[in-house]
């Protein structure tokens, strides 16, 4: 595990200090790649877009996932109601790409529907104008991600012990109050998983954007993962691509440490696990 | 929890409405996969297709493409690898939380970080080492890499699930004189069956839909999974499959995973009862 | 972050080890000239069917694996460092080919080319595209000409005849526009270069060639003028919405566009959309914007290459030689319905025959398609900027400046 994962990481780390085109030998160039990276305005745009993605991923799929999980919990047959949200996750990347090209393409299904229903918005160019393109792609990703989060929250709900809920109910707590004072705090292990994963996935956003706009037009919807991909796979500038990859990883690890350290120590302390 | 009847009706209504919205985009795929080349048009995407044409297109996928053969390979990967990852992940979670392994958090974090690094950057160096180790283009190699990629998620979820189980469970078992391994297999694993199932299903779906690893690390008919084949169908510059057939292929390939979620709903109902005790 | 210290120490060791083993390009050619040849490609074509032909003719069958997308290039590049270097693989005749040749990782094919050109199998113009520092590498499996495909029914309906000059073409476009038919197809992303290429090469082929070799700048007033010409055509409404993701073939079948500049491989696309060549669609040579001695035609050629360190080097070269010869070319174009580059091979359809004899009779000057003619890092930026130009119509200067910045950087590093 360590070998398979961390050797390539170390290799990438090394490449980020070299100039290398995938052939011949890497040539050491110090921090040139990092200087070039930070000096590129498209990189800064990618940082901005990636931040939109992180926030978007934390708000939409997590919030809706929790909503679906809570609404579809605790009565017979509720599993079937969760199913529609899981279908998008089951679809292959090709299917998802095709579906959203249909939806958002110029004069595509969404525009046709708005026209048919006489609604405003037919003049919007979903994928061509920034930051609208990033926003609609966040929604597309949410469409795919809600089901998974709902499922993870459901598992969390199942593991909540019955006694505190009963006790609270005897005290007269219902609905929102029951949820916010008892269920929500006891859901913390699941929330940690979902939020932790969402941060990582938001930072690493790639598939949807690659399928829809490839970061365009003129790199306006590029995320950091796309910048990395463009440098490495399109331009064969492995050094620069590696530098972006390292930057992205450091940010992700940093965010994870900040988030997990707090959350895990909290949950460990309150529930008696951990160190 | 025994919510009121009106409450349930309200909840069902909201969920059904939201669910219907969720399925609308999927309709587009189904509708257009059920059209002939002549019927398909970018300006009438909402128009429904016909079942006969859908069936025809599916039949062309089954007989005229490499999809069926590749599906068999993918099936192996997405059953075996997540199974390994789930068991390993549960072991890690158990060791860290219940056994309070020394530096447990550190170990956990090292595994967790495996999910941080972008896969796109891993795949080319991986190809190189796989070729040196003789793992390139082999079933073993693919199962290995998929298991490893699935492990962080599995460990993360299981660790947190075990953290939610009261410590007294473990202590009671120890007092009863049970050995650690027995506690793990007879108490903790059954108790977390729904979490294990969720992790397995999510990871199986991930493996099923992986494109990049399969694209680069295999080349033979006997090892190549289905996504590289499906993606290959999409490029039609100067030949290839017709577009509506490609759409049908995209549906066909997604059926097993959709079915997996469907079938597992019954299982979750059972898990529900278990989680409640 | 204590965790990272230990591995960091290991890093140097590991990386050194990786590098030491990385440069092992020794000759391991098994020397076989019959058998099963591993073939990596990124084309949608039916190589399994073609394998049966080659198996019968020269006792070599193809074990082909289809790849797609950008990682294909990275995979091939890396493969030369492993024992998996394919015996045959598809590539592109751009600077990506120069890089492989300069690095010595692909087999030289000078002998094959000398023989093929002498025997008249391939033209010398095509050979130039496969030449790096005076030597040849790789061989062509197809040479497509970029022509204008058009919907015959629309032309008949409005009584239009095939234009032979640029003015006539514009006349046709104006008439179509008047009748509510969008004359031309265009699209952003990978195909955003098409009209730049058509207009620039048609106006000043020399400038086009200078641009691709770094002798001229994108900000050159003559290039700006071409861009403004393009902009004017856009403003006249001669193109479909460039953001449309629909295939050109579908738009043409539905009569939403009348004409599309495409490689001759588009015949297969037309068939996929259910159109018949000669009945529903046909093609004509795109007239030059500024008439000169010869009409410029873009060519697009798909090469196959052989890894220098491949175990199947001999086998791959044998296959390449056969594919370029009439024995291989004839069944191949028959399968593809495409124009043969071999002047001895017979064109498979009446339309291709007509095009072939027209090209043989007139005066034409061939140039490498923009996608291959432009160095890859410049191309990446150019495709992005052309797409942006199509999406947000306006002053072309900012887009050209951005492309020129990439060009400056590239040529400075040469």
Image (cartoon, coloured by chain):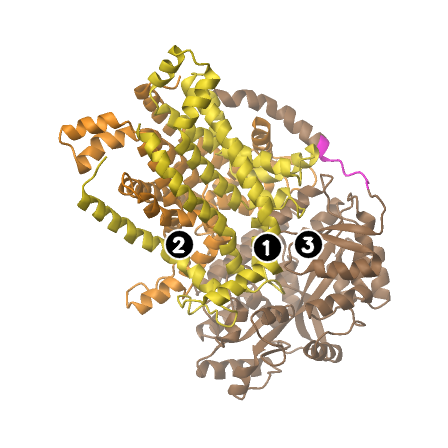
Chain colours: A orange, B yellow, C brown
User: Subunit of mark 2?
Assistant: A
Q: Which residue is mark 1?
A: B232
Residue C17: x and y in percent read 68, 27
Secondary structure under the numbered disc 1 in the rendered image: helix
Residue A169: x and y in percent read 17, 30
Residue C19 in view, yes or no: yes
Which one is in front, C110 or A60?
A60
Which one is in front, A242 or A211?
A211
Gap in angstroms between the C-alphas marked 1 and 3: 16 Å
Q: Which residue is mark 2?
A: A133
Residue A28: x and y in percent read 63, 33
Q: Residue furthest left?
A: A172
Q: Which residue is mark 3?
A: C91
Q: Main secondary structure of the magenta part?
A: loop
Which mark is in front, 2 or 1?
1
Magenta segment boundaries in residue numbering: C21-28
Specify the quadrant of the image occupied by residue A176: top left
Specify the quadrant of the image occupied by residue C153: bottom right
Give left or right: position of A37 versus A76. Answer: right
């Amino acid at each position: 595990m360590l070998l398979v994962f961390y050797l390539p990481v170390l290799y990438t780390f090394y490449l980020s200090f070299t100039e290398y085109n995938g052939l011949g030998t890497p040539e050491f160039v110090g921090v040139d790649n990092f200087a070039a990276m930070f000096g590129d305005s498209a990189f800064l745009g990618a940082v901005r877009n990636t931040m939109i993605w992180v926030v978007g991923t934390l708000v939409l799929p997590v919030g809706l996932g929790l909503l679906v999980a809570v609404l579809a919990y605790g009565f017979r047959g509720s599993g079937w109601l969760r199913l529609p949200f899981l279908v998008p996750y089951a679809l292959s990347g090709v299917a998802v790409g095709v579906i959203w090209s249909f939806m958002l393409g110029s004069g595509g299904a969404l525009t046709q529907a708005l026209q048919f229903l006489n609604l405003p918005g037919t003049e919007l160019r979903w994928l061509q104008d920034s930051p609208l393109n990033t926003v609609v792609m966040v929604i597309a990703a949410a469409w795919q991600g809600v089901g998974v989060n709902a499922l993870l929250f459901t598992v969390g709900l199942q593991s909540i012990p019955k006694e505190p809920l009963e006790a609270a109910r005897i005290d007269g707590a219902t609905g929102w109050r029951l949820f916010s004072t008892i269920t929500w705090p006891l859901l913390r292990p699941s929330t940690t998983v979902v939020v932790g994963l969402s941060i990582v996935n938001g930072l690493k956003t790639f598939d949807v954007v690659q399928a829809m706009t490839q970061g365009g037009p003129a790199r306006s919807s590029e995320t950091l993962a796309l910048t990395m991909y463009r440098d490495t796979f399109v331009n064969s500038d492995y050094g620069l691509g590696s530098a972006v990859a390292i930057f992205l990883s450091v940010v992700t690890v940093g965010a994870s440490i900040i988030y997990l350290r707090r959350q895990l120590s909290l949950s460990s302390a309150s529930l008696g696990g951990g160190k | 929890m025994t919510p009121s009847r009106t409450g349930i009706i309200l909840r069902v209504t909201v969920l059904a409405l939201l669910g219907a919205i969720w399925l609308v985009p999927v309709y587009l795929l189904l509708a257009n996969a059920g059209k002939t080349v002549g019927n398909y048009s970018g300006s009438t995407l909402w128009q429904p297709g016909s079942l006969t044409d859908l069936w025809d297109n599916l039949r062309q996928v089954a007989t005229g493409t490499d999809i069926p053969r590749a599906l068999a390979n993918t099936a192996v990967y997405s059953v075996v690898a997540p199974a390994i990852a789930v068991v390993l992940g549960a072991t890690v979670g158990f060791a860290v939380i219940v056994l309070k392994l020394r530096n447990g958090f550190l170990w956990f974090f090292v595994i967790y970080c495996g999910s941080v690094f972008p896969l796109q950057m891993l795949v080319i160096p991986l190809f190189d080492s796989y070729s040196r180790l003789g793992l390139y283009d082999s079933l073993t190699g693919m199962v290995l890499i998929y298991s490893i990629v699935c492990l962080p998620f599995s460990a993360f979820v299981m660790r947190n699930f075990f953290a939610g189980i009261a410590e007294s469970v473990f202590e009671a078992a120890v007092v009863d004189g049970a050995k650690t391994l027995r506690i793990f297999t007879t108490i903790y694993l059954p108790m977390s069956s729904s979490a294990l199932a969720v992790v397995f299903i999510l990871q199986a779906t991930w493996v099923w839909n992986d494109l990049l690893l399969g694209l680069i690390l295999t080349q033979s008919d006997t090892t190549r999974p289905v996504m590289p084949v499906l993606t290959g169908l999409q490029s039609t510059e100067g030949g290839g499959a017709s577009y509506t057939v490609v759409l049908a292929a995209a549906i066909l390939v997604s059926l097993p995973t959709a079915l997996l979620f469907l079938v597992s709903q019954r299982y979750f109902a059972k898990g529900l009862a278990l989680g409640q005790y | 972050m204590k965790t990272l210290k230990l591995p960091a120490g290991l890093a140097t060791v590991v990386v050194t080890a990786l590098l030491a083993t990385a440069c092992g390009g020794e000759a391991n050619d098994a020397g076989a000239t019959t058998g099963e040849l591993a073939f990596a490609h990124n084309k949608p074509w039916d190589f399994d069917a073609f394998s049966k032909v080659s198996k019968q003719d020269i006792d070599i069958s193809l074990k082909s694996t289809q790849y797609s997308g950008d990682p294909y290039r990275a995979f091939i590049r890396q493969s030369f460092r492993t024992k998996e270097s394919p015996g045959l693989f598809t590539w592109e005749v751009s600077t990506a080919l120069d890089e492989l040749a300069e690095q010595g990782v692909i087999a030289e094919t000078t002998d094959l080319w000398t023989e093929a050109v002498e025997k008249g199998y391939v033209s010398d113009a095509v050979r130039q595209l496969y030449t790096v520092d005076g030597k040849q590498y790789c061989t062509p499996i197809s040479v497509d000409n970029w022509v204008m495909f058009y919907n015959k029914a629309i032309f008949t309906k409005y009584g239009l005849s095939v234009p032979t000059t640029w003015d006539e073409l514009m006349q046709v476009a104006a008439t179509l526009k008047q009748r509510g038919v969008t004359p031309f197809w265009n699209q952003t992303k990978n195909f955003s270069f098409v009209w730049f290429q058509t207009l620039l090469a048609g106006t000043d082929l020399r400038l086009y060639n200078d641009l691709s070799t770094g002798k001229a700048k994108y900000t050159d007033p003559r290039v700006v003028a071409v861009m403004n010409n393009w902009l004017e055509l856009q403003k006249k409404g001669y193109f479909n919405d460039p953001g449309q993701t629909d295939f050109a073939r579908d738009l043409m079948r539905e009569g939403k566009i009348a004409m599309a500049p495409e490689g001759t491989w588009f015949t297969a696309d037309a068939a996929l959309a259910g159109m018949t060549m000669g009945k529903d669609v046909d093609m004509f040579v795109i007239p030059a914007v500024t008439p000169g001695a010869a009409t410029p035609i873009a060519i697009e050629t798909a090469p196959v290459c052989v890894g220098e360190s491949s175990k199947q080097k001999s086998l791959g070269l044998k296959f390449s030689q056969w594919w370029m010869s009439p024995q291989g070319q004839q069944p191949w174009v028959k399968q593809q319905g495409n124009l043969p580059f071999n002047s001895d091979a017979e064109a498979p359809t009446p339309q291709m025959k007509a095009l072939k004899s027209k090209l043989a009779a007139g005066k034409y000057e061939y140039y490498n398609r923009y996608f291959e003619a432009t160095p890859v890092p410049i191309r990446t930026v150019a495709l992005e900027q052309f797409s942006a130009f199509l999406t947000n119509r306006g002053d072309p200067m900012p887009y050209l400046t951005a492309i020129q910045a990439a060009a400056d950087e590239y040529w400075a590093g040469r």
